[in-house]
Image (tube, grey):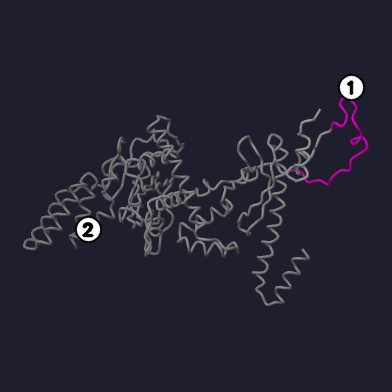
């Protein structure tokens, strides 16, 4: 403590910021404590599991944490034909990855909002240590790739190998499902653009507050997100597996799917009993764009199922458009759009009985795809490879589900060794033990061969001498 105070006083005398000096000194002390902690944990692992393994040497590595870089010296074990670091396994430190699991979670949160370069700059300021953008890029590729591999293995096991699908405990009837896509630019690919598909499922919504304009702000309950660049069929297969991990879909008799009318979105109801609803935002926007002032009147007529009123309004617009070829082409395209999605024009709660608490308003997809995905993927000048975009989408998916740390391995709890002062050996403990068995002369046990000094050079020489065959 006195040494730290002296360091702070010296920093103040040099005119440095006392807050910065205090932060750096606290981080320095935390790194010293962490190094000592890892030494104790390594000793505990040696006592618990090290007896069955052979110690080869000590190896050092640097772990970048919230308090800065920590130099860690731990034992390398030989387990048959492979080498192991027990401390790395317990603490969740992956090979060739310098960020700690806690810092990985923090870094993934920054990458979800900022570009790799900006996220690296912010993270470097937080941990008082330079972090390269490629380190964050590799982290996203590792975490996103791991999530994608797990989902692909689960999809193959369920839909091809016949394994049982995961079953959640939550119940929702009806279950609400929405989907949309984000078009992004590609680089180093055969195509110039591709689409990031996103789907969300939820049980309902709850009222949060009322804003200054009198509009009710609501939040979805039990939301599950899924995102990726897969083709439509494997996308929906994996999406339903993710939904099934939270909800018991066997007890869901009705699924309400909301979308903008894209063909791949309708695949979400394949093999399931449900209704499709054309997204109200996209429907109203298209009607206002083509019809102008009568657009909202047609919108209300269509969503309430008043076909005669909608036809009468459209007929009046057609009569006004006579002689204007461009206007007629727009009206023909609009009628084609309405005809293709005729089964989703009427509000879903007018076709089936809503829940006892009342109809759940749908249309949350725009907010759930614009801020997390479109803002991240479509900044000016950004372009992606398919693999990089898919893995970043997986990271955004994990963050939307509130589980980015699921693939950033967390440490396993172990009992630390009891730190007690060494006891002086008594004469009784050091006296030779006499047994009834006769032993050859000069027979002894090299304790250091299995102890904490097993990697020392002098111990290796003694082991080699002890293992040499006796010459007759």
User: For mark 1, does the 10 Å Cα neighbourhood hold few (<14), some (14 to 19), or many (20 or more) residues?
Assistant: few
**Magenta span covers which residues?**
417-443
Residue sitting nearer the eye, 402 or 95 = 95
**165 horizontally vs 264: left or right:** right
Residue 70 location in percent, x, y? 65, 56
Pointer 1 or 2: first along the chain: 2
**93 horizontally vs 187: left or right:** right
Identify whether 64 is placed above or below 163: below
Q: Secondary structure at mark 1?
A: loop
Taking the magenta stretch, the answer to whether it contains residue 428 is yes
Q: Are marks 1 and 2 in contact (CB under 8 Å)?
A: no
Most prominent secondary structure in the magenta stretch? loop
Identify whether 371 is placed above or below 236: below
Instruction: Give the CA separation, mark 1 to mark 2.
Output: 104 Å
Displayed quadrant of residue 418: top right
Residue sitting nearer the eye, 170 or 115 = 115
Identify whether 361 is placed above or below 153: below
Question: What residue is shown with label 1?
Answer: 436
Displayed quadrant of residue 188: bottom left
User: For mark 2, does the 10 Å Cα neighbourhood hold few (<14), some (14 to 19), or many (20 or more) residues?
Assistant: some
User: Any mark on residue 412, and which?
Assistant: none
Question: What residue is shown with label 2?
Answer: 296
Q: Residue furthest left?
A: 323
Residue 238 location in percent, x, y? 39, 40
Taking the magenta stretch, the answer to whether it contains residue 130 is no
Q: Nearer the viewer, mark 1 or mark 2?
A: 1
């Amino acid at each position: 403590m006195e040494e730290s105070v002296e360091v702070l006083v010296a920093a103040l005398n040099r005119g440095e910021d006392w807050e910065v000096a205090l932060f750096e000194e606290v981080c320095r002390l935390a790194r010293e404590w962490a190094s000592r902690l890892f030494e104790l944990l390594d000793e505990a692992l040696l006592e618990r599991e090290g007896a069955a393994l052979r110690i080869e040497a000590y190896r050092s590595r640097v772990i970048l944490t919230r308090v800065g870089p920590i130099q860690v010296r731990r034992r390398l074990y030989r387990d048959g034909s492979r080498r192991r670091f027990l401390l790395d396994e317990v603490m969740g430190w992956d090979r060739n990855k310098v960020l700690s699991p806690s810092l990985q979670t923090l870094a993934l949160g920054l990458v979800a909002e900022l570009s790799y370069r900006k996220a690296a700059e912010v993270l470097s300021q937080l941990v008082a240590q330079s972090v390269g953008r490629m380190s964050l890029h590799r982290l996203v590729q590792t975490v996103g790739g791991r999530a994608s591999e797990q989902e692909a293995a689960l999809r193959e096991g369920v839909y091809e190998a016949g394994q049982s699908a995961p079953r959640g405990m939550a119940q929702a009837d009806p279950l609400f499902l929405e989907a949309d896509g984000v078009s992004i630019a590609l680089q180093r690919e055969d195509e110039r653009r591709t689409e990031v598909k996103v789907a969300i499922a939820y049980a309902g919504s709850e009222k949060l507050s009322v804003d200054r304009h009198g509009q009710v702000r609501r939040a979805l309950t039990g939301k599950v997100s899924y995102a990726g660049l897969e083709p439509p069929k494997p996308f929906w297969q994996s999406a339903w597996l993710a939904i099934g991990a939270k909800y018991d879909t066997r007890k869901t008799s009705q699924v309400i799917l909301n979308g903008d009318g894209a063909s791949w979105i309708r695949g979400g109801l394949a093999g399931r009993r449900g209704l499709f609803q054309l997204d109200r935002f996209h429907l109203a926007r298209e009607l206002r764009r083509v019809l102008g002032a009568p657009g909202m009147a047609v919108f209300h007529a269509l969503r309430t199922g008043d076909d005669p009123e909608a036809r009468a309004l459209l007929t009046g617009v057609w009569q006004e458009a006579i002689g204007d070829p461009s206007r007629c082409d727009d009206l023909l395209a609009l009628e084609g759009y309405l005809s293709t999605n005729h089964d989703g024009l009427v509000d879903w709660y007018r076709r089936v009985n809503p829940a006892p608490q009342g109809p759940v308003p749908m249309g949350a997809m725009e907010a759930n795809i614009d801020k997390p995905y479109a803002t991240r993927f479509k900044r000016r000048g950004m372009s992606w490879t398919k693999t990089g975009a898919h893995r970043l989408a997986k990271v955004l998916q994990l963050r939307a589900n509130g589980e980015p740390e699921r693939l950033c391995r967390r440490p396993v709890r172990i009992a630390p060794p009891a730190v007690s002062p060494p006891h002086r050996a008594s004469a009784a403990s050091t006296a030779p033990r006499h047994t009834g068995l006769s032993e050859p002369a000069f027979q002894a046990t090299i304790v250091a061969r299995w102890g904490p000094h097993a990697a020392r050079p002098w111990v290796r020489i003694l082991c080699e001498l002890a293992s040499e065959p006796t010459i007759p």
